Image: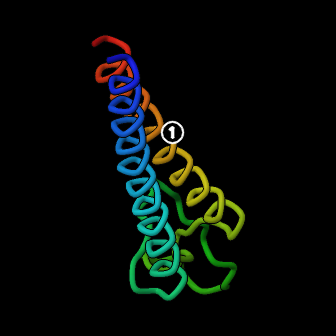
Amino acid sequence: MQLKDIQYRLKEVASLDKKYAEQRQKAAATVSQLEHDVAAGQRRLQLAASCSPSNSPRAARVDDGERPRLNDAAQRHYFTLRERIDTARLQIAGLQSYIREQCLK
């Protein structure tokens, strides 16, 4: 009886692992696609920023400032952090499922 129980639990754990591994891959692909879309100009990151005025000698106008944007390093860090947050969220969800379905039974 114990051997069958162990085999059953191993199958369930493998199923949980597969489920969350697929979700991690999907989340990584989503972040990668977002990063590609931003780099290609198809999507934009929305952020709180201020515009620095241009150095032209003419009278200042509302549209004289440069477009607000993240510098390249900050943009890379944004995508890295977003991927790590998704990974951590899915790892926590997987561990919680494992505890509920295996340890608390």
Quarter placement of the N terminus:
top left
Of residue 70 and residue 68, the one placed in the foreground of this image is 70
| Residue 24 point in image, percent of width and height | 45, 54
Tell me if mark 1 has few (under 14), some (14-19) or many (20+) residues whose alpha carbon lies within 10 angstroms of its own: few
Task: Look at 52% across and 59% down and name the residue there.
Answer: 50
Task: Look at 58% across and 50% down and name the residue there.
Answer: 81
Q: Is residue 20 above or below residue 93?
A: below
Label 1 residue SS: helix
Q: Quadrant of residue 47?
A: bottom left
**Residue 41 as seen in the image, left or right of residue 5:** right
| Residue 73 point in image, percent of width and height | 72, 64
| Residue 30 point in image, percent of width and height | 41, 67
Quarter placement of the C terminus:
top left
Q: Quadrant of residue 12?
A: top left
Q: Which residue is mark 1?
A: 88
Task: Look at 49% across and 62% down and name the residue there.
Answer: 28
**Residue 80 as seen in the image, left or right of residue 99:** right
Of residue 40 and residue 61, the one placed in the foreground of this image is 40
Residue reaching furthest front? 1
Task: Look at 34% across and 27% down and name the residue there.
Answer: 4
